[in-house]
Structures are given as structure tokens and as C-alpha cells.
Amino acid sequence: MTREHRYFVYLLTNWNNKVMYVGMTNDLLRRVYEHKTKAVKDFTEKYNVSRLVYFEETSDVLAALAREKEIKKWRREKKNALVIQTNPEWRDLSKDFGLPPSHSASHSPWYATSQTTCHSSSAPSCHSERREES
């Protein structure tokens, strides 16, 4: 039996959507939780970037890395358009799968289904950090 791998390219922002972070992981739930609890002392802690506003899923790690790199090169306006396309209110999508907006530790498991999919509302490391300030 083969295990299906899942990789996520995601965008986080701060409380007023002024700073944007583009990342890639194989465990979105864990990674967003780390951002929210500031478990890793880095860019996301410094700029308080913890609101998940967009993510995509694929089973191909190379496609995920390429997509992350592609989005990082985009101007801020194009990244904003990507978010607005599926999340026009810029909601914190992590609330949809049980992560609180604060630093508390409660969460619930969930599972998404797709090969290469853009998710805007419900859903869940290959490397921990790829960062960008826009």
C-alpha cells in the first residue's frame, strides 16, 4: 500500500493584511499552528503573520516547490488577486479546521481531497520556512 503525499503552498498575512508570507509544507495544520503559536522564532513572529488566507494542495513535491517559488516572485497586487479570487473577505481559513485565532492549542484533524487544488475555506513538512515580505 502506498501512502499518498500531500503538499501545500500557502499564504499568511498579519492582522491588517499589510505583510504577506508565502510558504510550503507537507503538514498544513501543524505548520499554521506553529505560525500561530510562534513556535519558530523568525519572520512570522517578527511581523505577526499568522492568518491563513489562501492555500493550494498537490501530491507532487516538485510542483509545490515550483508554485511556491512562482508566487514569491509575484508583485503584491497579483498575490492579493489570488487571495480575493477564493477568499474575498480575507478570512482566517485556519478557523475552518479548528485552529483558534489566538495562541491556544486546541485543534481538530481534518482531511481534504484533491490532487492539485486551491482551497479557500475548509481543509489541513517538507521544509519549514520559505519567507517573503511584500
Image (spheres, rainbow, N blue to C red):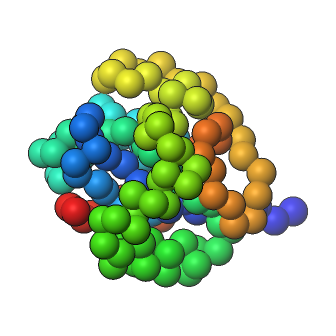
Q: Residue furthest left?
A: 46
**Relative depth, front residue between 134 and 32:** 134
Instruction: Specify the quadrant of the image occupied by residue 34.
Output: top left
Q: Is residue 4 left or right of residue 43?
A: right
Which residue is at the front of the view, 19 or 9? 19
Q: Judge whether 46 appears above or below 126 on screen.
A: above
Front-most of residues 62 and 52: 52
Q: Position of residue 41 (x, y in %)?
A: 17, 46
What quarter of the picture does the N terminus occupy?
Answer: bottom right
- Asked if residue 110 is positioned above or below residue 17 in the image, the reply reads above
Residue 100 in the image: state x and y as whole percent: 43, 22
Residue at the far right in the pictured view: 1
Q: Is residue 6 visible?
A: no
Please tell me which residue is depicted at 45% across the width and 45% down the height of the picture: 53
Q: Quadrant of the C terminus?
A: bottom left
Looking at the picture, does residue 33 appear above or below residue 129? above
Q: Is residue 45 visible?
A: yes
Please give the name of the residue rendered at 31% of the width and 72% of the height, measured from the top-left corner: 75
The structure residue drawn at horizontal position 47% and vertical position 53%, both measured from the top left corner, is 83
At 47% from the left edge and 19% from the top edge, which residue is drawn? 106
Q: How many marks?
A: 0
What is the x, y in percent for residue 115?
Answer: 75, 65
